[in-house]
């Protein structure tokens, strides 16, 4: 492609900003990033409170976050944030130690079995499911793998046939069942369901395992994780500052028309002309959202194939609150409540995060899910009331609500569409209509998978 190609990027979150960085590294400098909000970072949102930053969105990374590491190197920053730590409570607020055999003598047989299954799972993933952990979903439904190895920072291109990969379309609970490793769900659920990514009986195994590949999951278990002192938003603020063309904020896109090999974007009433467009913003939002966000199908001259495929996308309703407690009620550590990660306890508090160890004048953040594909959605206010009540039960009641949002979170498709080759169809449309699709739906809803997808997209098409 001509290095002077005029490229419009929609969205100033991790996917859009890293697309800018990788384009720039490859010699494309004629790109424009349009962001609808007055800040960059997207779901990496780190507001200030009492002189420090807390996290309303993304919190942590892992040593396998190679694309995020590319950004750190580009900007000369590092992961310098507070060490993560955690304990566990049951739904009644009692402290428990679910993985300690000494504290659970009756559970020893189950814990031993789980340990064995985790080992077996690691081996199966390496052998039977070779190629499972590549970024994105190309070929999976057809039993192929194609992409870049995520085993180390070199990310060498790899490809091959592996018919077993088709199993990844199954819901994760079913995937574990057919492989005789049901108990590994006790480990994987912590960094999956409580982090807002849905329930194992509804979400295809591909999403679970591309994010929580064996190594990354073990990093969660050992708390070998990264955080950033100024918050995850800082990573993307820094990247934005280091780009030749920083994102244009407050850019409300009213219309996009693609005709005669050009892309016409109407922004704040003005029409701008480009050659190509990369969409990292939501492709489809099935309901009317209070924050006014809409999918690309609502403001593009959407074609039939785009509408047909994108209308299969659903997303999680994941609610985050930042609350102040009294000094007396401030938790001494972050807590996970496994009881509340079951679908029967939808809309309850699953985790609360205490970021700063040395101070009680900071907020804690709470996390709840309120949607499952086969159940009625829990209304926002009902969920909020439940979570505040749960905090009382946990003996860490809120004194004041400081911040709250209901996030457009983790867009995905369900098993049937995954198995029917949804991803290969969308991948086959990359570049058609001078449009490229990136962001969370194309890989997974975390900082690194989205940034890595942008890297590979630039490698493949530009
Ligand atoms: C509570 C929470 C906790 C999380 N924890 C973690 C974690 O610990 N680790 C991790 O790696 N990830 C975590 N994530 C996920 C991570 O933040 C996202 O996956 C990542 O930010 C996705 O990047 P993106 O650029 O694809 O999308 P986004 O971050 O959503 O960015 C998209 C951008 O596009 C903009 N936009 C939307 N529509 C338009 C439009 N029409 N025109 C212009 N701009 C538009 C949006 O305003 C936004 O800035 C968490 C997210 C949340 C909400």
Image (cartoon, rainbow, N blue to C red):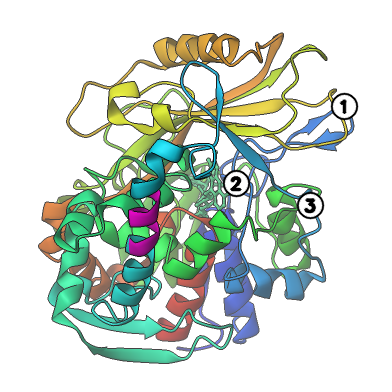
Q: Position of residue 31 (x, y in %)?
A: 58, 70
Q: Residues within 10 Å of mark 2 (few under 14, many from 20)?
A: some
Q: Which residue, given by chain and number where applicable, does mark 1 sit on?
A: 50
Note whether residue 162 is visible: yes
Q: Position of residue 318 (x, y in %)?
A: 44, 32
Q: Which residues are magenta?
A: 111-116
Residue 66 image-quadrant placement: bottom right
Check disc 3 and report its element: helix, strand or loop. loop
Image position of 406 with respect to 30: above or below: above
What is the magenta segment's predominant secondary structure? helix
Question: Residue sitting at 41 percent across and 27 percent down?
Answer: 340
Which mark sits nearer the N-terminus, 3 or 2? 2
* C-alpha span from label 3 to label 1: 17 Å
Q: In the rendered view, would you say 361 is above or below 335?
A: above
Q: Which residue is mark 2?
A: 58
Report whether the residue tagged 3 is closer than 8 Å to ligand 1: no
The question of residue 113 being in magenta is answered with yes
Q: Nearer the viewer, residue 299 or 23?
A: 23
Of badges 3 and 2, nearer the viewer stands 3
Q: Locate the N terminus by quadrant.
A: bottom left
Q: How far is mark 1 from mark 2, CA to CA?
A: 20 Å
Q: Residue at x 28, y 23 (%)?
A: 344
């Amino acid at each position: 492609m001509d290095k002077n190609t005029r490229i419009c990027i929609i969205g100033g979150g991790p996917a859009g900003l890293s697309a800018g960085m990788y384009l720039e590294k490859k010699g494309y400098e004629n790109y424009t990033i349009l962001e609808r909000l007055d800040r960059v970072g997207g779901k990496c949102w780190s507001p200030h409170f009492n002189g420090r930053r807390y996290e309303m969105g993304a919190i942590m990374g892992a040593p396998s976050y190679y694309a995020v590491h590319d950004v750190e190197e580009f900007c000369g920053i590092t992961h310098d944030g507070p060490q993560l730590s955690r304990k566990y409570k049951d739904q009644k607020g009692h402290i428990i130690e679910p993985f300690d055999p000494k504290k659970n003598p009756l559970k020893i047989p189950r814990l031993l079995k789980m340990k064995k299954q985790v080992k077996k799972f690691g081996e199966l993933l390496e052998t039977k499911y070779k190629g499972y952990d590549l970024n994105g979903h190309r070929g999976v439904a057809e039993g192929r793998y194609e992409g870049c190895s995520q085993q180390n920072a070199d990310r060498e291109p790899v490809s091959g046939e592996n018919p077993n990969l088709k199993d990844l379309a199954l819901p994760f609970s079913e995937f574990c069942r057919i492989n005789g490793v049901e108990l590994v769900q006790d480990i994987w659920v912590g960094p999956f369901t409580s982090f807002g990514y849905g329930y194992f009986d509804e979400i295809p195994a591909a999403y679970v395992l591309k994010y929580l590949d064996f190594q990354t999951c073990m990093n969660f278990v050992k708390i070998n994780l990264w955080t950033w002192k100024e918050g995850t938003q800082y990573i993307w603020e820094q990247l934005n500052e280091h780009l030749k063309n920083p994102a244009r904020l407050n850019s409300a896109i009213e219309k996009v028309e693609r005709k005669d090999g050009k892309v016409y974007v109407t922004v704040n009433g003005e029409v701008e002309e480009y050659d190509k467009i990369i969409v990292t913003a939501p492709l489809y939002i099935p309901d009317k959202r209070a924050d006014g966000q809409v999918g690309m199908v609502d403001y593009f001259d959407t074609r039939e194939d785009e509408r047909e495929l994108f209308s299969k996308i659903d997303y999680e309703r994941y609610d985050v609150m930042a609350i102040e407690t009294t000094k007396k009620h401030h938790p001494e550590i972050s807590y996970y409540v496994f009881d509340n990660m079951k679908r029967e306890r939808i809309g309850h508090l699953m985790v609360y995060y205490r970021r700063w160890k040395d101070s009680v004048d900071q907020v804690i953040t709470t996390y709840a899910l309120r949607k499952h594909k086969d159940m009625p959605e829990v209304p926002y206010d009902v969920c909020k009331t439940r979570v505040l009540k749960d905090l009382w039960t946990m003996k860490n009641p809120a004194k004041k609500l400081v911040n709250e949002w209901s996030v457009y979170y983790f867009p995905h498709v369900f098993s049937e569409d995954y198995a029917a080759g949804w991803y290969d169809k969308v991948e086959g449309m990359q570049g058609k209509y001078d449009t490229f699709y990136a962001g969370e739906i194309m890989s997974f809803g975390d900082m690194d998978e989205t940034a890595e997808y942008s890297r590979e997209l630039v490698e493949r098409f530009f």
